[in-house]
Image: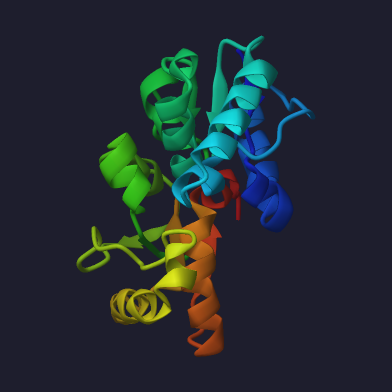
Amino acid sequence: MRVALFITCFNDTLFPATGRATVALLERLGHAVTFPEEQTCCGQMHGNTGYSGDGDALARRWERVFEPFDVVVSPSASCVGFVRERVPSARGRLFELTEFLVDELGVTDVGASFPHRVTLHPTCHSLRLLRVGDRPWRLLSAVQGIDLVELPEADECCGFGGTFAVKNADTSMAMLSDKLRRVLDTRAEVCTAADNSCLMHIGGALRRQRAGVRTMHLAEILAATE
């Protein structure tokens, strides 16, 4: 299958390892991956901050760039949710990574090996907008050698919310403190999620506390062969 990668500007700029892992994973499963170089921000940041006109314009640009592709995959639940909402033609052909693996390819064991203790933070967009359910958990459970532990109160927001963390810093930090305490309670080596935005928020606090817990996008674990 020929798959177009919608990497998102956030991943492309700050977390390129996630894009490389997504490509490695899809190619391992036998699919050809295309990267449309004309892609830019999808407009989520603008739309969610109240600049609807700018957000819609970028969403229309996304539609033009990805129009030639029947299947588009992205390692970002939040961006997939925004584009589906604003671009009706994306529905049925734009997939968040775990949706694509489980629903479209019908696989949960992707041939990964990752012998570490891991906990999963199911991001708000994954849970509430895309409703990916247990797909990330099923994929992680099939990874060889993994010690996957449940995160207490997993469905609570980490407090990021894009510009929410800037405009409502005190509330955001209070929510983040609760999330960190629960991550540390699992004694996990790694906290993973389907959105690097949440992992950046959580990971920054973990580093400042020198907690010894690292963050990794789910795609990087699924691509691993340690």
Outermost residue toward the left in this view: 153
Is the residue 103 above or below the residue 69 in the image?
A: below
Picture quadrant where residue 165 is located: bottom left
Residue nearest the viewer, comparing 187 with 44:
44
- As drawn, 17 above or below 28: below
Q: Nearer the viewer, residue 162 or 183?
A: 162
Name the foreground residue: 199 vs 225. 199
Colour option used: rainbow
Image x and y of residue 24, in percent? 67, 37
* Residue positioned 54% across, 31% down in the render: 56
Left/right placement of residue 59 relative to residue 132 reads right
Residue 114 shows up from this direction: no
Which image quadrant: the N terminus? top right
Q: Quadrant of residue 72?
A: top right
Residue beneath the point at 60% across and 49% down: 225
Residue 50, image x, y percentages: 46, 48
What is the quadrant of the C terminus in the image? bottom right
